[in-house]
Amino acid sequence: MTQARIAIVFYSTYGTNHQVALAAADAAKAAGAEVRLRRIAETAPADVVAGQEAWKNQLDKMQDIAEVSHDDMEWANGYFFISPTRFGTVASQMRAFIDTLGGLWGAGKLANKTFTAATSAQNAHAGQETTLMGLYTTAIHWGSILVTPGFTDDSIFAAGGNPYGFSASAGGFDDKGRAAVAHQTKRLVEMTAKLAA
Ligand SMILES: Cc1cc2nc3c(=O)[nH]c(=O)nc-3n(C[C@H](O)[C@H](O)[C@H](O)COP(=O)(O)O)c2cc1C
């Protein structure tokens, strides 16, 4: 079977989505995929970042992870996008990268690939589904094959029961979350490999 090539593309200000992305990378490797873990570039002004100790520390912590490139997007045959909720939708840092992809989209380089997403939010009912749907709307434009977790495993129920994609409480990524992310990632890898076969 052709191998899944999964790009895990994440943005994180305070660390939660960084942890989720690391868990997804581990799970994708364990499921037999080739993996590129990539972070979205920070677009907030340096003085704003420096004005918040936690934000600055988190950015420092991620320096060893390469920023996502167009080559990564072309290379992958499956995507896992991970972003915090910002006022009910995807972080602008991630949208800024997405908005550079018109050329690749026009050349058909994003089409017919799998796509799944995860998010985090401060509050349980303040944007988790809408953030995921925002990412899926974009994926629909790309001609992606959406691979949502649905309720295909007990871990989904145990981690809060979000069939759209894993959603963490900010700062609260735990073992139940890890299991749900592992399941969602394994499903992505398996579906990607089947499509590529
Ligand atoms: C500008 C801004 C807007 C936010 N909007 C929401 C929101 O609409 N709903 C919510 O529950 N949390 C909101 N939050 C909280 C973030 O979702 C939370 O900080 C994030 O999930 C933590 O992820 P991270 O640790 O990966 O940065 C917001 C935070 C910021 C800074």
Image (spheres, rainbow, N blue to C red):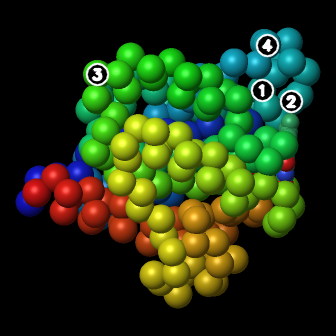
Q: Nearer the viewer, mark 1 or mark 4?
A: 4
Q: x, y (%) of residue 32? A: 23, 59
The first of marks 4 and 3 along the sequence is: 4
Q: Quadrant location of residue 51?
A: top right
Quick check: 194 left or right of 139?
A: left
Residue at 62% x, 53% y is 133
Q: Is residue 24 above or below residue 50?
A: below
Q: Are marks 1 and 4 in contact (CB under 8 Å)?
A: no
The residue tagged 2 is 53
Dot 2: what SS? helix
Q: Are marks 1 and 2 in contact (CB under 8 Å)?
A: yes
The residue tagged 1 is 56
Q: Are marks 4 and 2 in contact (CB under 8 Å)?
A: no
Q: Is residue 181 visible?
A: yes
Q: Is residue 194 above or below residue 152?
A: above
Give, as a three-letter code, the residue at label 4: Pro
The first of marks 1 and 4 along the sequence is: 4
